[in-house]
Amino acid sequence: NAGVMQNPRHLVRRRGQEARLRCSPMKGHSHVYWYRQLPEEGLKFMVYLQKENIIDESGMPKERFSAEFPKEGPSILRIQQVVRGDSAAYFCASSGLAVKETQYFGPGTRLLVL
Amino acid sequence: GQQLNQSPQSMFIQEGEDVSMNCTSSSIFNTWLWYKQDPGEGPVLLIALYKAGELTSNGRLTAQFGITRKDSFLNISASIPSDVGIYFCAERTQGGSEKLVFGKGTKLTVNP
């Protein structure tokens, strides 16, 4: 019973390039959350998605960042024209349908922008 | 916005010692969660608390949801080297996204 999968685990990009981070939720889970963690900090919420819908994107920067969770396939967090300040660990979590359902986290993608 | 104050920021202890860390909130919430993060990994849920005054144990871990609903503590008894990691408190927002708000973490080092 696979947990939340994220790939790549590490990603290096030069300033101005695009970064695509993928997340496959646990089997049977239809809720996906993305969080960002800066060094020595806690996780900060970015966006909450259900299949084909963005439910809450209040934590997403207004520009360059986008997320999707298509009907088929993984959820994608896309960062266009990356800058050094985007360097961080990006975590995906998934949960099921029930109220108070636990969010299970993936191992994260560590993005380094040179 | 919601703020969680977690303390201490770091702890250095000897194997076998007990550990206590706590978290306070500027707002009242209905859920307190405690996570542990190992280096290079994602957070793993340790204990979830849903009622004011609730005291819950998970092996050597014990956590309590404060009566005021604005604080929580986590105790680890008889620490062992594998307890090393960063411990985060988190709250779940209500009504809608159920997103989590995390504290800044307590980094625990256990000397054998």
Image: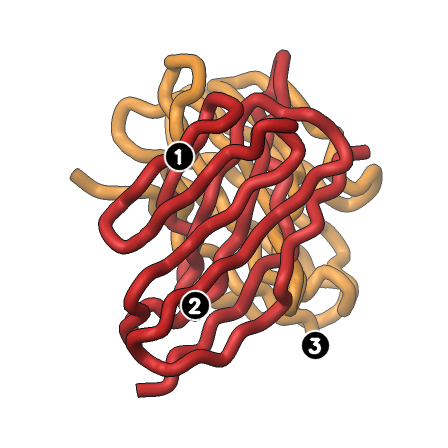
Chain colours: A orange, B red
Image marks 2 and 1: residues in contact by CB distance under 8 Å: no
Q: Is residue B23 left or right of residue A58?
A: left
Helix, strand or loop status at disc 1: strand
Helix, strand or loop status at disc 2: strand
Q: Is residue B4 left or right of residue A21?
A: right
Expressed as whole percent of the image width and height from the top left, the position of residue B110 reads 39, 79
Q: Residue at x 31, y 79 (%)?
A: B15
Q: Nearer the viewer, residue A52 or B5?
A: B5
Asked if badge 3 and badge 2 are on a common chain, one would say no
Image marks 3 and 2: residues in contact by CB distance under 8 Å: no
Mark 2 — residue?
Answer: B85
Is residue B97 at all visible to an observer of this figure?
yes
What residue occupies the far left of the structure in this picture? A1
Expressed as whole percent of the image width and height from the top left, the position of residue B97 reads 60, 20
Disc 2/disc 1 C-alpha distance (Å): 23 Å
- Is residue A76 positioned above or below B76 on the image? above
Mark 3 — residue?
Answer: A114
Q: Residue at x 34, y 67 (%)?
A: B83
Mark 1 — residue?
Answer: B55
Is residue A7 at all visible to an observer of this figure?
no
Disc 1/disc 3 C-alpha distance (Å): 47 Å
Disc 3/disc 2 C-alpha distance (Å): 28 Å
Q: Nearer the viewer, residue A106 or B35?
A: B35
Chain of the residue under the numbered disc 3 shown in the image: A
Q: Amino acid at mark 2?
A: Gly
Image marks 1 and 3: residues in contact by CB distance under 8 Å: no
What residue occupies the far bottom of the structure in this picture? B112
Helix, strand or loop status at disc 3: loop
